[in-house]
Amino acid sequence: MLEQIAFALVFIAGVSLFALRIKAIRRNILLGRDDDRSDNSSARWKTMALVALGQSKMVVRPVAGIMHILIYLGFVIINIEVLEIIIDGVTGHHRIFAGIGGLYDFLIGSFEILALGVLVSCVVFLARRNMLRIKRFHSAEMTKWPKSDANIILIVEILLMFAFLSMNACDALLQGALVQAQAEGAEISEKLSHYAQAGSFPISQFLNPLYEGLSVSGLIMMERFMWWFHIVGILGFLVYVPYSKHFHIFLAFPNTYYSNLNPKGGFNNMEAVTKEVQLMMDPSADPYAAPDPNAAPPAKFGAKDANDLTWKQLMDSYSCTECGRCTSQCPANQTGKLLSPRKIMMDTRDRIEEIGKNMDKNKGTFQDDGKTLLGDYISEEELWACTSCNACVEACPVNIDPLGIIVDLRRYLIMEESKSPESITAMFNNIENNGAPWAFPASDRGKWTEEMNEA
Amino acid sequence: MSQAIHVPTMAEMLAKGETPEVLFWVGCSGSFDDRAKKITKAIAKILTHAGVKFAVLGAEESCTGDPAKRAGNEFLYQMQAMQNIMVLNGYEIKNIVTGCPHCFNIMKNEYPELGGNYEVQHHTQFINQLIKDGRLQVKDGEIFKGKRITFHDPCYLGRGNDVYEAPRSVLQQLDAELVEMRRCKKQGLCCGAGGAQMFKEAEPGNKEVNIERTEEALEVKPNVIATGCPFCNTMMTDGVKNFEKEGSVEVKDIAELIAEAADLL
Ligand code: SF4
Ligand code: SF4
Ligand code: SF4
Ligand code: SF4
C-alpha cells in the first residue's frame, strides 16, 4: 500500500510539473502576432504525417536518420510498457497486461529488441557527438548548455534502457525461482508469488549473469529498484523535456501541421503597408484628411523583439532541435560569415523565454528590461549576410523557417529605423528614381531591342 | 539569321489592335547589364524562331521590387509592384515569361495578393514547353558533342518554386553530357547574389559565396556552367575569372545554349 501511495504521489508530481511548463510555453507562444494558418487542413495533415511522423527530411542524411527513427520508434512503442507500469504502480499489480497471453510475450520481446536498438543508437550518437568533430555540433552558438543538454538526454536514455532490461532480467530470474519453488513444494512468500510466468526476454537474458548470484530477496529488491529507477527516470524525463531542445518530440507535430504550404520563394505580404501604399497612390485621397480616431494604433513594421514575431515563428523556436542542419547548409555560414540560422532560432527562443520569465516576476505584465531580440541577441551584421536562399528552410527536419524571422527583423531596420548598408540605400534610391536597382535611365530599358540585329 | 527581328512593345501591339500570346518580362538585369542583355536577346530570338507572338513593355517596365522586398523595404516593393500591376492589368496581360527567376518568383507568388494574377513562367519552363509542343527544334549541330555541362540551380527557381526538371530537360536537347554538382537541386548552393546581396559588399567572412560555388562547379570539370538567372550568371562568371579558367570554362544561360544549338545567334 505504501508503495502505491508513494508511486501515486511521484506520478502526480511529475505530470503536474510537466503541465505547468506546457502552460507557460503555450502562453509564451501566444505572445506572438496573429498568423492565420487554419486553411487547407488536408494538406496540413499530410505534411505532418510525412515530415513529423514519417521523418521524411531526416533520412536526407541516411545513417543519422535511420538511427533517429530507431530511437523514435523505441520511444513511442515503449510507452505502451510505461502504461502498464503506471497501472501496476497505482493498483499494486505486477504485469497487469500479462493476461493477454502470447501477444504479451511478443510485445515484451519486441520492447526488449527496441530497447537494445535505442541503447546502441544512443551510445553511437554520444560517441559521434563528442568524439567525431562534426562541425555543426561545435559552432559558436553551441555553448555549454546546448552541448550538455544533448549529452544529458543521451546518457539518461542509456541508463533508462539499461534499467528496463535489468528489471526484466531480474523478473525472469524470479519467475524461474517461483517455478522451481512450486516444483519443490517449498513455501512461497507473498512477494515471490507475484512473479508468475509472463513475457519473453530475448535481450535481457544476456544480463542474467549479472544478477544470478543474488538471493530471492536480493533479486526482488533489485527488480523493485530497477522498476522504480525506470519509472522515476521517465517521469523526470517528462519534466525535463519541455525545458530542453528535446521538446521537439511533441512540438514537431503541431509545428509541421502549421508549416508554410506556399512556395518557399514567396514572402508574405504586409497588409498594413498595402493600405498605406494604396492611399499614397490613390489620386482622390485627401492627404490632409484627419486620421480616423477609431483606428487602432499602427503596429510597428517588422519585428524588433521576439513578441513582434508571429506565434508560428515562436512555435518554430520552441521546436528547434539545435541539430544545425540549417546552418551546415547556409551559404553565408559556410563562407565564414557570422550568420547562423540555428542561432537565429535559439536566440528567438531564449528571448521569448526571457520575456515570459519577466512577466511571471511582474504579475503577468512585461516590464521593460532594456533589451530586444534585434541588437541584444541578433546583430545587423548577421541579418545582412543572408542571401534569402531558403537552404535553411529546406534542410530543417521539422519545417522551421529562420528566413522569415531574418526578413521581419530587416523590415524593422529599414522601415522603422531607416538603417541599411550604404549601398543598399543607394539601390533603394535607384529603384525609386529610375525603376531599376542601378542608375540607368528608365528610358533606356528597351535599348536592347535596337541592338537585336547586331552581330 | 538573315531576317531582321523586330521586338514589339505592348503599346505598338495595342495600337495595331493585336494581343500577344505572351509578355516577355525582361527584368532590370536583362535590360541594362551588357552580359545579361545577350541572354535577353537569345530569349527573344528563340521566341521569334518558334513563332511565338510576344511583346515587351519597354520603357513601361519597372523593377519588380524584388531587391527592395528581400532587403526589407516593403514600402518600396509594394509601390513598384502596384505600378507594374497597373500597367500589366491595363494591357490585360494573362501570360508572362520572365528572363529572371527573381522576377518569376515575385510575379507568380507575391503579385497576386496585390491584385496581379498572371500565368507566369520562367524562360526555361517556356522553352521546355515549346520543345515539347514541337514548336522549337534544336537541331544538334554537334557543337556540344563531347562537352560537359553542369547546371547551377537558381534558388528562386529551384527551392523557391520547386522547378528542377524543366531546365534539365531543355539541356538534354543538347548533344552534351549533363553532370551534376555535389550540391544540386534541393541541396543546391546559392551563388551569393540573392536577398539583395548583389547590391552590397559581403559581410566579413573567409570566402565569397560565389567562389565556394564556382569551386564546386569546377570540381566536375565542366566545359560549360549553365545558368538560368542573370545574377547567377554574373556571380559564376566572376568566380570562373577568379580561378583564371575563363579560357576553358564558359558560363552561359540555358537560353544562350539553346539559341546557339539552333543556330540562331
Ligand atoms: S536563407 Fe539566409 S539564413 Fe537561410 S540558409 Fe540562406 S543565407 Fe542562410
Ligand atoms: S532550425 Fe531546424 S535545422 Fe536548424 S537547428 Fe533547428 S531544428 Fe535543426
Ligand atoms: S527582380 Fe531583378 S531583374 Fe527582376 S526587375 Fe527586379 S532587379 Fe530587375
Ligand atoms: S542569384 Fe543566387 S539567390 Fe538568386 S537565384 Fe541565383 S543562386 Fe539564387
Image: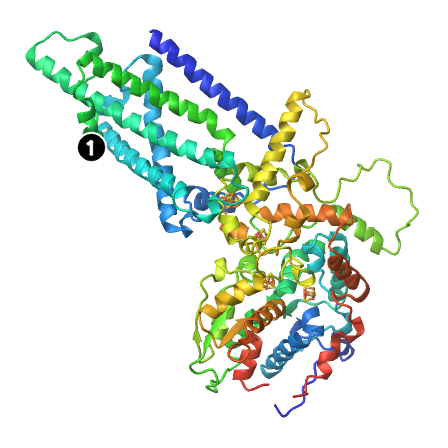
User: Residue B211 appears at what percent x and percent y?
Assistant: 55, 65
Most extreme residue toward the bottom, as rendered? B2
Which residue is located at x 41 percent, y 23 percent?
A: A235
Q: Callout 1 environment at 10 Å: few (<14), some (14 to 19), or many (20+)?
A: few
Which residue is located at x 48 percent, y 58 percent?
A: B187
Label 1 lies in what chain? A
Residue A445 quadrant: bottom right
Which residue is located at x 75 percent, y 55 percent?
A: B78
* Ligand 4 - quadrant of the structure image: bottom right
- In this rendering, would A209 be left or right of A16? left
Label total for image: 1
- In this rendering, would A9 be left or right of B130? left
Most extreme residue toward the left, as rendered? A184
Q: In which quarter of the image is the N terminus of chain A?
A: top left
User: Residue A400 appears at what percent x and percent y?
Assistant: 54, 45
Q: How is the image coloured?
A: rainbow
Residue A441 higher or lower than A397, as above or below: below
Q: What element carries label 1?
A: loop
Q: In which quarter of the image is the C terminus of chain A?
A: bottom right
The residue labelled by disc 1 is: A202
- In this rendering, would A450 be left or right of B175? right
User: Residue B100 appears at what percent x and percent y?
Assistant: 63, 67
Give the camera-side residue of B32 and B24: B32
Q: Is mark 1 within 8 Å of ligand 2?
A: no
Can residue A397 be seen? Answer: no
- In this rendering, would A292 be left or right of B93? right
Residue B23 quadrant: bottom right
User: Residue B224 appears at what percent x and percent y?
Assistant: 50, 76
For the residue marked with disc 1, what is the amino acid? Pro
Can residue A267 be seen? Answer: yes
Residue A36 higher or lower than B128, as above or below: above
Give the camera-side residue of A199 and A317: A317
